[in-house]
Structures are given as C-alpha cells and as structure tokens.
Image (tube, grey):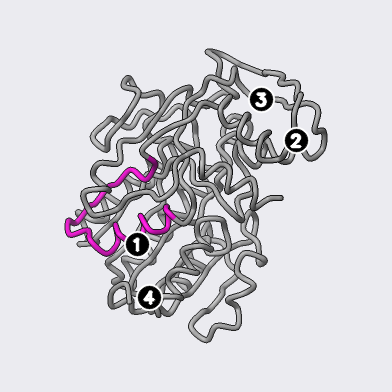
Amino acid sequence: MIKDCGAVLVTGGAGFIGSHIVDKLLSEGCAVRIIDNFSSGSVDNIRRVLDNGSIEVIKGDLRNIDDALKAVKGIATVFHFAANPEVRVSSIDPRIHFENNVIATFNVLEAMRRYDVKEIVFASSSSVYGEPSEFIVNEDAPMRPVSVYGASKAAGENLIHAYVRLYGFKAVILRYANVIGPRLRHGVVYDFVMKLKRDPTRLEVLGDGNQVRSFIYIDDAITATVVAWRKSTQDINIYNVGNDDWLTVNDVAKIVISAMGLSNVAIQYRPVGHGVGWPGDVKRIVLDISRLKSLGFKPTLSSEEAVRRTVLSYL
C-alpha cells in the first residue's frame, strides 16, 4: 500500500490526470471518493472501476460550497485535480478559469478547514512561471503567469500557502509540464492527431513551430505524483513534474506524422505575437525536475517516446 490512505477524495476524478490517479489509488487499496461535474471529465474514464467496492462517485460542482462540503466530509487526503484545463480559453472567456480554478479551490480549502482535513495534493501547472527569463526553470523561479489559466493556478497555490500557515495543513503542489497519454482530449498532440484524421494531407500548426516544451507520459506523471505524496515531509512541498528532455512543436508534428504512417503532409503555420500559438501561450519553457528526482523518481519514457505512445493510443 502507498501509505495509510484513509479515505481519499479526488476532485476532477473523471478527468484525464484525475482518473489515472483514481486507478492508482484503488490499485493500492485506498478508499476513493470522486467529485466531478463532468464538464470536461467523462464517465468513460472511470467506467471500468465503477463496480469497485472502494469507490464513491459524486456528481457535483465545486463552485458550490455545499457540494465541496459534501465531497470533503469524512476524507483524510484531498487530491485536488478539478480545473478547466484548456489554456486557450483564458484569452476568450477568463471568467471560466476564475470560477472553475480559483473559486473551486477556495471552496475545497474551506471545506477542508471546516472538517479539519489536513492534507492536500494540488495539481498546479508550469504555466505559473509564464515566460521565464531562463530556458530551464526550477521551483524557485518567480511566478509570473501570462495567461489567466496560469494566474488561476498561481492563485490556487497562494491560497494553499495561506491555509497551510493559518490552519496547519500539509500541501504537496505539483507543477505539471505537458502530461500526455490515453484519455487526454486537449493539447498539441491530440490537436495534431484529430486534424490529420480529418485531412491527412495538411496540418495547421498554431505558432511558428519553434515553441519548446517537455512532455511526460501519464504513467510517469502518476508515479511522480505518488512519490511526491509519499515522501514529502515539509508543510509545503513544491515539485516540477516533467521530463529530462524537450521537443519543439515542429518535432511533435514530425513524430505524429510518422506515427500515423503519413507522408507529404503540408504544414501551415499560424503564429501570433512572438511566434506563439495564441495570446497567453508561452514560447519556451522546460522544467528542472532535480528536486523530484532527489526523491527517487525518474521518467521511464523520453518526450519523444511519450508523444509516440500517445499517438498510438488514439489510433
């Protein structure tokens, strides 16, 4: 068993990362409660575990404090993974991220305070760093988000900091890079595969193709999450969760095209600003994962292997 789990709540447990966390916790013998409003999450992501006697599913909305209280009551640890994950929404309707990511996080923390739940594992994002001055960033880099999504995650982290100091919580904050794999339904890899399924002769690339990212496969991300939860000893523990290498968006396009067995694909670029894909997109960022690796974690798949395996899962 991972540790003495007690009862564990996974918010957003029907989403991409959340549903994989649920799988892992159940496999380790934890009793798991899920709350999800199923706006971006899907019952298909959790269907195979619904008959597990150790799972409870609540359809609820964490923007509503009563739903948050219902979900948190009787829980020992909260894995807070509920959020609107689509960064591009920030530039179109910023209120979506404020309500789903900030208000929901506040309500979760308030419910924890009222029911004296002391431990939270929070899914943050590399987007809190914004456009870093250094190509590779560690956890000490300042939070300077350039999207409302990034700002909402930074706000969540700051709320957690306050609740840790005021109410004696323990927090594990995970700043994920690009997590990819089965069940993912957004992001560049999914976008490329869907576009090429519709038209295998042409690929539209948002940006100039020179954006730099690292990619981590979902299995590695879940292992990292559990290692961080198990081994963290401080009141506030912050970890970058990414890979040891990186790719450009052009590299990703080539891998996707190759994995789909295509050739002679015409690539059309749609850059804005300084070559990014949309307002609030970041041109270059790679996470330094030395702190996470000091706990004994090491990715098993490179960024390229992660992209290729993700494409094959869609096919």
Q: Is residue 7 left or right of residue 283?
A: left
Q: Residue at x 40, y 37 (%)?
A: 126
Which residue is labeled 3 in the image?
205
- Is 249 colored magenta in this rendering? no
Q: Residue at x 68, y 33 (%)?
A: 257
Bounds of the magenta span? 220-243
Residue 259 in the image: above or below residue 160: above
Which residue is labeled 2 in the image?
195
Real-space CA distance between mark 3 and mark 4, rounded to the nearest whole angstrom: 44 Å
Q: Amino acid at mark 1?
A: Val
**Splitting the image into 4 quarters, where does residue 134 fall?**
top left
Real-space CA distance between mark 1 and mark 4, rounded to the nearest whole angstrom: 18 Å
Camera-nearest label, 2 or 4: 2
Secondary structure category for the residue under label 1: helix
Q: Residues within 10 Å of mark 2 (few under 14, many from 20)?
A: some
Which residue is labeled 4 in the image?
75
Q: Amino acid at mark 4?
A: Ile
Which x, y percent locates residue 4? 28, 78
Which x, y percent locates residue 185? 64, 48
1 and 4 marks in contact (CB < 8 Å)? no
- Is 234 colored magenta in this rendering? yes
Of the two numbered discs 1 and 4 on the same chain, state the one appearing first in sequence.
4
Of the two numbered discs 2 and 3 on the same chain, state the one appearing first in sequence.
2
Of the two numbered discs 2 and 4 on the same chain, state the one appearing first in sequence.
4
Q: Is residue 65 left or right of residue 48?
A: left
Residue 89 in the image: above or below residue 210: below
Front residue of 174/167: it is 174
